[in-house]
């Protein structure tokens, strides 16, 4: 989905977000499965509609209640001749749809139109009773059924009754054929309304999600800048449960932005949060940030941990390089957000550092935006943006906590070295810790 494999979708929180979406109808669920990057006009409409829905929470829930009563009738209306069960489903749909329209008209959604279907409802409910039960009726059937009742009162197994049952079945089949033919003229209107019902339901699900997580409308950048203020990731907040979640701020206004920091320093969380929210924006969602400016990327690419491809016999590093090859070719003709989370971690450090620096230098010339998280030194260079994870903060002797805020740093600022502090903070065995400290002194670290 959107170029991300299953582990990446789960790790960045996309599966979590899609799981939190709650479409009320099968038509909304169809729209979610068919999500795609939106054009500028479609994005403006999507954002306007989410704002409209969020401004009327009570009416939103009323509308969702009607949508929840709609069944999937696509299979029924696709038939040349509908059965009695099909007509029951269509009648129930149209009665519910009639109730939905006044609730829908309380809103002023852009690009979503629901048209009345009284003529179609008159076919399946000719007496206008507006009850869900469906019975095949005609004057001829009424007469046959009276005669059948009379015959049953005499001898329920008589030849007369059997003949009347055959006549009744034939007449019912005839009426069903005639009603099906009459309904055919309304199929285009059915299909158009079903599409708009799906768009409406999807919009309401987005609005409900945005309200739940205090998401905000992003600004579409016309200057190629990607910027987030107090960016969050609901999946990470869910995973951390009662622990406070750090919200980060960063701006990608140059070709390459580098995030450095020690292990456990939150670099991967920052990368995945940027990728998740940027993807959601391009799909017409509000983002989980106080403010955001997002360009119209043609695609979003991520290379992250656990990319080993067992089927192709590739190592983690091999899978990264294969994916990098694909991204580079796309970047020659598309405007991409390229996110690299600890690229080349699966090879030896000397080669890994050389590869990461070369990749950064190359991507700086492509016209794409690249966000790299690395523990290698001197990857950032003049012209690159450089952020560092603040890292360990000490509140008292022996007491420390990890501060995941991003702070801007000079391009030549050394990568923070918190590994030894983390060993101490996590209570590593004293004898082993002493050996590590001796090695640090030997290497003059």
Image (tube, rainbow, N blue to C red):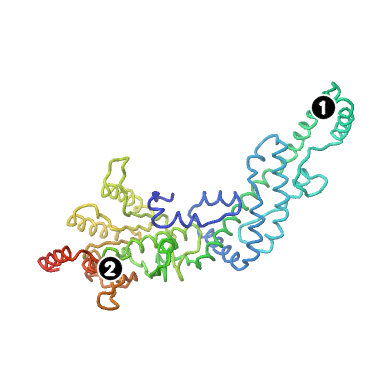
Q: Nearer the viewer, residue 419 or 187?
A: 419
Q: Residue furthest top?
A: 159
Q: Residue at x 50, y 60 (%)?
A: 285
Residue where numbered disc 1 is placed: 167
Residue 367 placement (x, y as % from top left): 34, 59
Residue at the image position 83 percent from the left and 46 percent from the top: 127
Answer with left or right where residue 385 lies relative to residue 281.
left
Q: Quadrant of residue 109?
A: bottom right
Q: Nearer the viewer, residue 244 or 364?
A: 244
Residue farthest along the bottom direction in this orientation: 396
Count the labels in the image.
2
Q: Is disc 1 placed on a helix, strand or loop?
A: helix
Q: Nearer the viewer, mark 1 or mark 2?
A: 1
Q: Quadrant of residue 300?
A: bottom left
* Residue 181 point in image, percent of width and height: 74, 37
Which label was assigned to residue 383? 2
| Residue nearest the viewer, comparing 80 with 267 | 267
When the figure is inspected, residue 124 is found, relative to residue 249, above or below; the finding is above
Gap in angstroms between the C-alphas marked 1 and 2: 87 Å
């Amino acid at each position: 989905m959107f170029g991300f494999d299953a582990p990446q979708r789960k790790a960045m929180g996309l599966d979590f977000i899609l799981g939190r979406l709650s479409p009320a109808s099968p038509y909304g669920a169809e729209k979610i499965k068919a999500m795609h990057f939106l054009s500028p006009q479609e994005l403006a409409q999507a954002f306007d509609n989410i704002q409209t829905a969020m401004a009327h929470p009570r009416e939103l829930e009323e509308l969702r209640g009607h949508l929840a009563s709609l069944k999937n009738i696509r299979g029924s209306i696709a038939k040349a001749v509908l059965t009695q069960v099909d007509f029951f489903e269509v009648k129930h749909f149209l009665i519910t749809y009639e109730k939905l329209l006044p609730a829908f008209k309380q809103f002023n959604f852009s690009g979503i139109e629901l048209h009345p279907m009284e003529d179609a409802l008159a076919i399946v409910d000719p007496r206008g009773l507006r009850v869900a039960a469906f019975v095949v009726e005609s004057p001829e059937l009424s007469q046959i059924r009276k005669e059948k009742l009379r015959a049953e009162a005499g001898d329920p197994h008589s030849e007369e009754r059997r003949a009347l049952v055959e006549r009744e079945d034939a007449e019912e089949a005839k009426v069903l054929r005639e009603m099906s033919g009459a309904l055919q003229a309304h199929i285009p209107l059915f299909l158009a309304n079903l599409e708009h019902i799906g768009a409406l339901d999807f919009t309401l699900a987005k609005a409900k999600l945005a309200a739940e997580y205090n998401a905000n409308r992003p600004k579409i950048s016309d200057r190629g800048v990607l910027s987030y203020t107090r960016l969050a990731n609901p999946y990470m907040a869910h995973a951390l449960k009662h622990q406070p979640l750090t919200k980060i701020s960063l701006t990608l206004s140059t070709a390459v932005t580098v995030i450095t920091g020690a292990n456990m320093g939150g670099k991967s969380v920052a990368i995945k949060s940027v990728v998740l929210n940027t993807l959601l924006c391009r799909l017409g969602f509000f983002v989980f940030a106080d403010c955001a400016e997002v360009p119209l990327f043609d695609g979003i690419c991520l290379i992250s941990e656990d990319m080993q491809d067992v089927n192709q016999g590739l190592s983690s590093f091999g899978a990264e390089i294969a994916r990098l090859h694909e991204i580079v070719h796309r970047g020659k003709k598309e405007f991409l957000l390229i996110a690299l989370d600890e690229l080349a971690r699966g090879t030896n450090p000397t080669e890994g550092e050389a590869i990461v620096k070369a990749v950064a230098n190359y991507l700086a010339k492509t016209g794409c935006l690249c966000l790299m998280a690395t523990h290698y030194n001197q990857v950032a260079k003049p012209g690159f943006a450089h952020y560092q994870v603040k890292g360990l903060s000490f509140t008292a002797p022996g007491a420390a906590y990890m501060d995941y805020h991003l702070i801007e740093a000079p391009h030549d600022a050394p990568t923070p070295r918190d590994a030894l502090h983390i060993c101490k903070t996590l209570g590593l065995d004293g004898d082993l810790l002493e050996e590590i400290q001796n090695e640090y002194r030997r290497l003059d670290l």
